[in-house]
Amino acid sequence: MTDTAGRRYIDFLAGCSSLNYGHNDPDMKAALIDHIAGDGIAHGLDMHTEAKGAFIETFEANILKPRDMDHKLMFVGPTGANAVEAAMKIARKATGRTNVIAFTNGFHGVTQGALAATGNSYHRGGAGTTLNNVTRMPYDGYMGAEFDTCDLLAAMLKDASSGMDAPAAILLETVQGEGGLNAASPEWIARVAQLARDHGALLIIDDIQAGCGRTGSFFSFDEMGITPDIVTLAKSVSGFGLPMGLVLVRPEHDVMGPAEHNGTFRGNTHAFVTARVAIQKFWSDGRLQEDVSRRAAMVEDGLKTIAAMIPGAYLKGRGMMRGVDVGSGDLAGNICAHAFCEGLIVETSGPNDEVVKILAPLTISDATLGKGLNILIDAARSVTSNFKVAAE
Amino acid sequence: MTDTAGRRYIDFLAGCSSLNYGHNDPDMKAALIDHIAGDGIAHGLDMHTEAKGAFIETFEANILKPRDMDHKLMFVGPTGANAVEAAMKIARKATGRTNVIAFTNGFHGVTQGALAATGNSYHRGGAGTTLNNVTRMPYDGYMGAEFDTCDLLAAMLKDASSGMDAPAAILLETVQGEGGLNAASPEWIARVAQLARDHGALLIIDDIQAGCGRTGSFFSFDEMGITPDIVTLAKSVSGFGLPMGLVLVRPEHDVMGPAEHNGTFRGNTHAFVTARVAIQKFWSDGRLQEDVSRRAAMVEDGLKTIAAMIPGAYLKGRGMMRGVDVGSGDLAGNICAHAFCEGLIVETSGPNDEVVKILAPLTISDATLGKGLNILIDAARSVTSNFKVAAE
Amino acid sequence: MTDTAGRRYIDFLAGCSSLNYGHNDPDMKAALIDHIAGDGIAHGLDMHTEAKGAFIETFEANILKPRDMDHKLMFVGPTGANAVEAAMKIARKATGRTNVIAFTNGFHGVTQGALAATGNSYHRGGAGTTLNNVTRMPYDGYMGAEFDTCDLLAAMLKDASSGMDAPAAILLETVQGEGGLNAASPEWIARVAQLARDHGALLIIDDIQAGCGRTGSFFSFDEMGITPDIVTLAKSVSGFGLPMGLVLVRPEHDVMGPAEHNGTFRGNTHAFVTARVAIQKFWSDGRLQEDVSRRAAMVEDGLKTIAAMIPGAYLKGRGMMRGVDVGSGDLAGNICAHAFCEGLIVETSGPNDEVVKILAPLTISDATLGKGLNILIDAARSVTSNFKVAAE
Amino acid sequence: MTDTAGRRYIDFLAGCSSLNYGHNDPDMKAALIDHIAGDGIAHGLDMHTEAKGAFIETFEANILKPRDMDHKLMFVGPTGANAVEAAMKIARKATGRTNVIAFTNGFHGVTQGALAATGNSYHRGGAGTTLNNVTRMPYDGYMGAEFDTCDLLAAMLKDASSGMDAPAAILLETVQGEGGLNAASPEWIARVAQLARDHGALLIIDDIQAGCGRTGSFFSFDEMGITPDIVTLAKSVSGFGLPMGLVLVRPEHDVMGPAEHNGTFRGNTHAFVTARVAIQKFWSDGRLQEDVSRRAAMVEDGLKTIAAMIPGAYLKGRGMMRGVDVGSGDLAGNICAHAFCEGLIVETSGPNDEVVKILAPLTISDATLGKGLNILIDAARSVTSNFKVAAE
């Protein structure tokens, strides 16, 4: 990336995970220019267009079939929040229940239905009204390693006097991107999935930030032995940063009538064009996945180096959605600011912004990644030295 | 008590704790007949009447002053649910917040505001609409002895991304009468009180069932070192089983305007007459409290005898609000049915009716109490023998 | 009535219509003293007691049978608000819908469910939270004589895009007691009843203030050719001012499970005793109804005299639930204050307290009624003269 | 437009008013290809980008300044529903109130907050939960020409016992696009604006469908003498059919904190590029407005011809957002089907699909427009002849 003054930056933010394949991938760019130059339709409401058909075919062949997933694709308004709203509506309509179980530090968007499931009080405060029909439960690890928070969920679901109304859905991110890169264990997620099944609730995995390869495989829940009833995708699904929202729903829960959840921009054809290319280019074989695995290890090593400088610091997240909790928002902010001066775009995360968070493009070269990590390590070293000096 | 066939029963139910002083106490009866015969006002809306004035004076002198409590008396509609509704409204208006924290297995009434705080799904299902603006937390002991549920409450209150909206109030019973006689420890309650204070929430103790001497002292929270912002009373406060609801509120939270929470029957003068006598007779000295202490020990001994017969059975509750969890609703029901045949009225409690619950009048004679306990012990012996025979 | 200084008053308030049969009726008094002296049960939860049985029998024989009403009696917590809460819950459970249609200036109580249906913003403001699931429609006459507000109700019910969700119930008072003595015409009420039937909604008549003879017949909707699905009663139903709430519900809508809408004081036996006497004494023949008819005419004449003194003043209400709208809360308040000095208790009503409201006991003697009316007329004359003088 | 079989169609739908400037305008297309080919940023979160800056400057210079509007531009998630959600949140936060007044047949989107304001029961039914905090009022003309529905709004706002909670906002479309092309009169709108001001509510004009020139001028409320506090735009604002949502808010109500209403795709740079071109090309002078005025007259003439064929039929809408209510969904559907066979894309609207609706591109040539109108007139003639034959 280059700023208006011509300065170049390494990007460890990737548009909050909406640019997993980097900026302006040449193949997507070419396909998009072709489409526009050839007077392809830009806007198709919910009608079938060639670009939409080609995307569906590609997605089913490369993503769903290999995983034995029979989910239907539902195109929603081109935002993640819209996908979450649609998912909650489907679950409520399919089950005839209203309560949705969501978790501490979950982030699912800021429109009213999605905002009720979002934990952050700053965003919730913007509603100007009460946010209801969501029961909040502690996420994996919320009470430390000794207490399995699933035990509480199981106890309240089983107890007819717990005050927890029968849930339409359990909604969760496998890694909480905005909530501080908390990664739930596969065992905890599998147990939640089982509880959902046992209690007649739909399991919704919000894979808007953690999906599209961010944690290593296409879905963040691959190889966990679960099949979510509903999956929400947005951010990187178009591959090029274009607005697109997608809901995957198992056929038996596909209860919405035609245009019942409607919207003008469900047929953003430009996004379909780039999304198709993204799937074909990156997910028709295992190369990207191998690259991500290797790069994730580099990120882990880099963050471990930083953690070693700061007493109490520890790593968070999974795959290429990693960070280091440095214990203080001030410290994390200082490290990022230092890194920015040296040409690295990197942000903080967590309830108190105490996590230095790395969301590099998955396609970043190993060399650039290494360079960026060194900048970050140097920034951490410099800031922690100053802290020590100040403390003496 | 005598039934229509002239049979006499010992009462271990006491009108669900609304007849703590037994049926038809002679002094209350005499005062009430005097009042009616003298054409005293039966119904006074919210106007000041002599009967009301006398009750207030007596209550303040004998209950509030000795405890250094400066609470105002607010007369509400003559039901417990109405007292809880008023308490929740006061807390919301005083704090400008809407969220109320309530607990698993709590029972606070079935009108819509109170029902939102009640845990029981059977009652909640009667609402026919969603019940909102309440966050449910696990009560003391809900996850076993090793996990202090206050830790979760504290963590969620502190965490700005927990999704728990800032609470107007924390609402709890010190012993959950309908929820299975769960008694919270004084330490847990004191910690909840401190958390309420730290986070700007009002502490509401719902003492409708556990108050008026049921646990030994007048309030169930006496000698716990806490001062609730609001206390709700009903059931035994009139002493004679007459409908009466009362809210005690600290002066700084007395935010309701005149008749803002109104109702026709807030001035049930008959109840004021008997309520005054009840306070004067039973709470102007320490005799009842001593009696209750002795009788509570008798109840405990009796229940221990029963618990010893049943593997896994254990005692619940506090004071003269005790029971034994026998592990199965069938077994508990059988014991109560057997006891009824032998002339003892006793009921089950708990989410699955697995607790045999004793709510004898506080004024029951030691002899009658002993007789009732023996009937219950015999019933338990008889039922458990049959169970064993059946099992062999 | 006599105050603490020994002064005697004529009562034109009748405990807000909860003392329709006056204070301390001797027959009810005798029966109640007998009951108490004979150690009758004071408090019966929801068990069948002799007093309850006798009341039910009397009510069915004298009230329901003559009207061919097959409604079940449901005893609820002893307040009007509790009756309304129960009625709304029944309607929602029976229809599987949540929306309740209520009207401008309706008053139905201040617990959360009932408060949502109450129009008054002062009371609504006390909730401290949003009040929902009620659609508000203009009451009869709200937009003047030319516009039938039923047309709007009909149009919105029929229009699938009106935004009015299918209603569980339409809830109304035939005369709005707190809202300014607005009396709906029989034609309007019959049309609302038909609309409810056509659209699958239950018709709930809240007869808490207008029922028990207040408008002339026992129910305020007698002789309108309608059969409400649910009727709520409280206030004067016990006859003696004792707390009692009652819901009448047609058998096909009797959907509540045992104790699903529970409460400690549903079995206020004292109230059953006096309620039975009230029905037997006043409603086993047509004498009271004739008396009320004659006295209502006296009230009407008196109010007309007052209206004639004040430009723009007009009569409101029906039966012995009458008033005169004098156009200004100040003026109405002054008249009442003057009357009070002369020994008459009378109150204002209406959104701006602009209605001088007469709710005399139905059993008031013609002589006392006449005397009271004269005091009120004199007060009005005196106040209006002063107003004129002041204006000159 | 050309279908997959190579057939050409005239488009009287214009992507539901999201393609006001037609498909693939060459100038926007060129600018967009330039941007992409030059590796411009596709996705900018909420950061300042060149494309965004250029759009803001152009919009302020050509749209806001000439109208003396001082509104701030708030970029929201790229859907109309998201713009409405943001507008409602702003109004609630700015006023500290929750109630929003919306109108019969209004359509504002299907995410939970916006859906509460939408009237259509089919869409509302998809929520799976109750939709609250919105009061529904009849739109202009809802009760016929004799009754000014503003009178009801005014009466309920003024009456403290009406049950209408003080509103945060009054939200309306000047022409209801989905609700049947109901056009409110300027007088009615001006009165609503005044009522909003008098009662401390914000006026939100949802100009998503009616704005961007559709009714003749850029905003649908131009020349009505009102200044809305908030305006929502989407659909045609990007000019090219690309997803974009925009909220205009007066500075004194700009209460949202940074990212309080956030979202990944608020910075859809491609849309900024085409949106800038659209404003420069079509709104820097009065030519388009003149064209639209002339074409609107042609549409009106055409529709009058059709209306004359059908007893009771009448015109609806305003500008180039017009239709004819033919009294029956079947008839309207038949006309559109016939027209489609002859190469015209045209749709129905209204609660019962009884309106044949013309939403031609504003930039359509007079010749093509005339041709399309002739097809529609012929279709109507053919269908109504058949109807008559069938009826004989």
Image: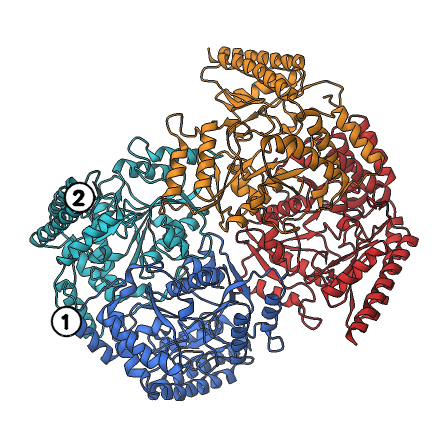
Chain colours: A cyan, B orange, C red, D blue
Q: Which residue shows up at 51% across the image and 46% down it?
A: B131
Q: Which mark is residue A351?
A: none
Residue type at mark 1 is: Gly
The one of B381 and C166 positioned closer to us in this rendering: B381
Which quadrant of the structure image shows residue D241? bottom left
Chain ID of residue with mark 1: D
Q: Quadrant of residue C234?
A: top right
Element under disc 1: loop
Q: Badge 2 is on which residue?
A: A388
* Up-down relation of residue D281 to residue C214 (above or below): below
Q: Residue furthest toward the right?
A: C367
Q: Callout 2 environment at 10 Å: few (<14), some (14 to 19), or many (20+)?
A: few
In the image, is D9 to the left or to the right of B24? left
Q: Label 2 is found on which chain of the structure?
A: A
- For disc 1, the marked residue is D38
Q: Residue at x 60, y 33 (%)?
A: B208
Work out whether residue D273 or residue B99 is closer to the camera in this orientation and state it. B99
Name the mark nearer the viewer: 1 or 2: 2
When asked about the image quadrant of residue B57, the answer is: top right
Question: In the image shown, does A202 or B73 lie closer to the viewer?
Answer: B73
Cα separation, mark 1 vs mark 2, equals 46 Å
Q: Is residue C370 above or below residue D175?
A: above
**Where is residue A281 shown, x and y percent of the image?**
14, 57
Q: Residue D108: image x %, image y %?
A: 43, 66
Tell me the kind of residue under disc 2.
Lys
Q: Is residue A319 left or right of residue A120?
A: left
C243 in relation to A60, above or below: above
